[in-house]
Amino acid sequence: DSGVTQTPKHLITATGQRVTLRCSPRSGDLSVYWYQQSLDQGLQFLIQYYNGEERAKGNILERFSAQQFPDLHSELNLSSLELGDSALYFCASSVGGTPKSYEQYFGPGTRLTVT
Amino acid sequence: AQTVTQSQPEMSVQEAETVTLSCTYDTSESDYYLFWYKQPPSRQMILVIRQEAYKQQNATENRFSVNFQKAAKSFSLKISDSQLGDAAMYFCAYRSNSNYQLIWGAGTKLIIKP
């Protein structure tokens, strides 16, 4: 158990819908990262937050957005869902906000299926 | 742009034997980290081992060790005394010290034969 929690574990929804994935980092970690793992594109970095502020952006679609709240939990919002958005979405956390800070610890992921 | 390549989609090894998984990467940076993550059927992503590029000594964690060849941009993982619980997808990942994101290889599926 990494200490990072993600809810829900599974999500099934229809095309065009909007969903919210939630992540709680390890106690004491200020950085949260979101990754997408899909069959065709492998693992991709989406976005990073540090202490409530966006720090880095990767291959995140405009239909997707994220935020980190004062209690440090983070939410990833996916809208206008398409079949290709079906994937495993991971949240990871680390202690600090600098690239030299410690390694990232991953949550169990949320499996999103878009039908 | 940095890239990570794992050329072995699948490897198999007899239980108690040793297996080596390959990873190469491409970067123009000199300061970075390399990681091996394990993803068992549960889909949880578990950190196996980490190597800092500035360290010449190869990292070791119990039965897991790496062969880090900085000039060749190679970072292989050796698993000694393979156990059934080692069966998983193994991902090699790169992170520079000027960037936050992990860049991933495609993964190698490791099968352990009893």
Image (cartoon, rainbow, N blue to C red):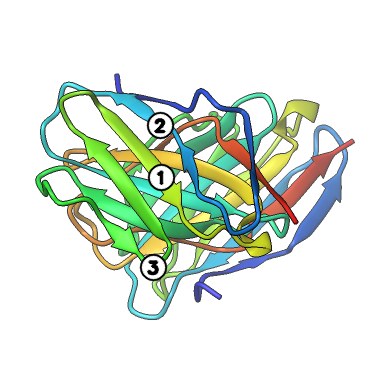
Question: Which residue is depicted at the point 86% across and 49% down?
Answer: A12
Q: CA distance from mark 3 to mark 2?
A: 20 Å
Q: Is residue B107 above or below residue A52?
A: above
Tell me the tag on residue B23.
2
Q: Which residue is labeled 1 in the image?
A: B77
Same chain assignment for discs 2 and 1? yes
Q: CA distance from mark 2 to mark 1?
A: 8 Å
CB contact under 8 Å: marks 2 and 1: yes
State which tag comes first along the sequence, 3 or 2. Answer: 2
Question: Which residue is depicted at the point 50% across and 72% down?
Answer: A2
- Picture coordinates of residue B88, whole percent (x, y): 64, 50
Nearer to the camera, B37 or B66: B66
Q: Quadrant of residue A75?
A: bottom right
Foreground mark, 3 or 2? 3
The image quadrant where one finds the C terminus of chain B is bottom right
Q: Which residue is labeled 3 in the image?
A: B62
State which tag comes first along the sequence, 2 or 1. Answer: 2
Q: Residues within 10 Å of mark 3 (few under 14, many from 20)?
A: few
Q: Is residue A92 above or below residue B22?
A: below
Q: Amino acid at mark 2?
A: Cys
